[in-house]
Image (cartoon, helix red, strand yellow):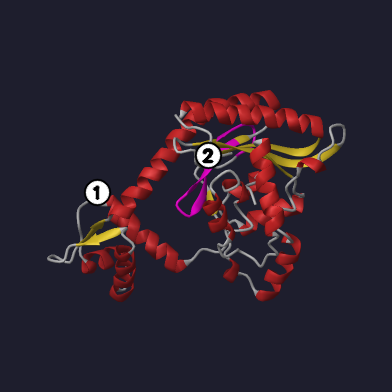
Amino acid sequence: MSAGISEVREVGRRSAPTQRVVQVLDYVVARRGRRTGLSEMARELGLAKPTCLGILTELAAAGYLTRDPRTREYGPGPALIAAGRVAQESFSIAALAHPELERLSAAYGTTCTASAVVGERISVLDSAGPAMVQVGATYRFAPPVGLMYVLWDTEAAFDAWLSTAPTVPLRQDETLLRRIMAECRDRGYLVESTTGAGRQLYSLLAGVAGHDLPEQLRTAVAELVTTLGERVYLGSDLRPRKEHPVSLLAAPTYDADGRQQLVLTMYVGKPITGAEIARRGTTLVAAADAVTAAAGGRHPANR
């Protein structure tokens, strides 16, 4: 599932344990490399020492923090450096995309965005156009959200996303999804159709983990979601003269290793003919290719 305009706003119930982890990370980053001990950190953050110790232990085990065995003080770890580099690179590439987003937006009178997977979240990195899209907004990278972020990546990346625990129960038609992947790679762009109710539904799912939903609601939502891939138009679905209700078009940019990097999205939100879809898709792919070239990227040799 991709991100509609309403989907880029983080929604849903907030998690108190997660907020405490964020508190600890923010505290460590704000100290700019100066180490601190458990007692001081717990006191300044208003956390119980056992709670704070548990968070510190897990973050240190994952490499986000380091612990000095002599002083028992904590500081930034190598995983924070790696995450920071990925985020910095993503925002730098998004800046290269901005002129293309502006041109697309002016040409079609619509909103265009650049987004990418940063860590375990999908982030909106840039936007141009009339609609208010919050740059920096994030949402969970798990089925049914995020298909477009793996369509043009490696088979391993596609399989990893597909095997991620979904936000709601899903019927995953892997044969259909692989057909969609093959067609989108050949065509160069994705065409998605969703109803207004569907966009509202996925906006909610963007910020709600499956276990946060009562069982009856999870079952009802699953019936609405149906099968992954049903919202994507295949080539055989699009007739040149027939109008098709289109939510958005999306195309990828690539990095120097030929890996999918950004997704450029053009929102439509109305019925347009198959011929117009093809024209817009070709223009969107050209914009994505320009960003790839500007960033020193290349298309995968084997696709």
Separation of marks 2 and 1 at Cα, in angstroms: 30 Å
User: Does the image show residue 101?
Assistant: no
In this view, the mark in front (2 or 1): 2
What is the x, y in percent for residue 219?
A: 71, 71
Using residue 232 as the reference point, say whether residue 263 is left or right of it. left
Q: Find residue 278 and report its image quarter.
A: top right
**Residue under the image location 57 percent in, 62 percent down:** 163
Q: Where is residue 177 in the image (x, y as percent from the top left)?
A: 68, 53
Residue 182 rendering spot, x and y as whole percentages: 66, 45
| Residue type beneath disc 1 | Arg
- Asked if residue 297 is among those painted magenta in the image, a careful observer would answer no
Quadrant in which the C terminus appears: top right
Mark 2 highlights which residue?
Answer: 262
With respect to residue 214, does 287 lie above or below?
above
The residue lying toward the viewer, choosing from 112 and 86, is: 86
Q: Taking the image as drawn, is residue 214 in sight?
A: yes
The numbered disc on residue 32 is 1
Start-end of magenta stretch: 113-132
Q: What element carries label 2?
A: strand
Quarter of the rendering containing residue 63: bottom left
Residue at left offset 74%, top offset 68%: 220
Q: Residue 68: x, y in percent?
A: 17, 62
The image quarter in which residue 201 lies = bottom right
The residue lying at 36 percent from left, 43 percent from top is: 85
Q: Residue, x 34% and y 49% (percent of image)? A: 82
- Residue 123, labelled with which disc? none
Which residue in the rendered view is the most extreme toward the front? 302
What secondary structure is found at the residue carrying circle 1?
Answer: loop
Q: Which of 38 and 185 is in front in this view?
A: 185
Q: What residue type is labelled 2?
A: Leu
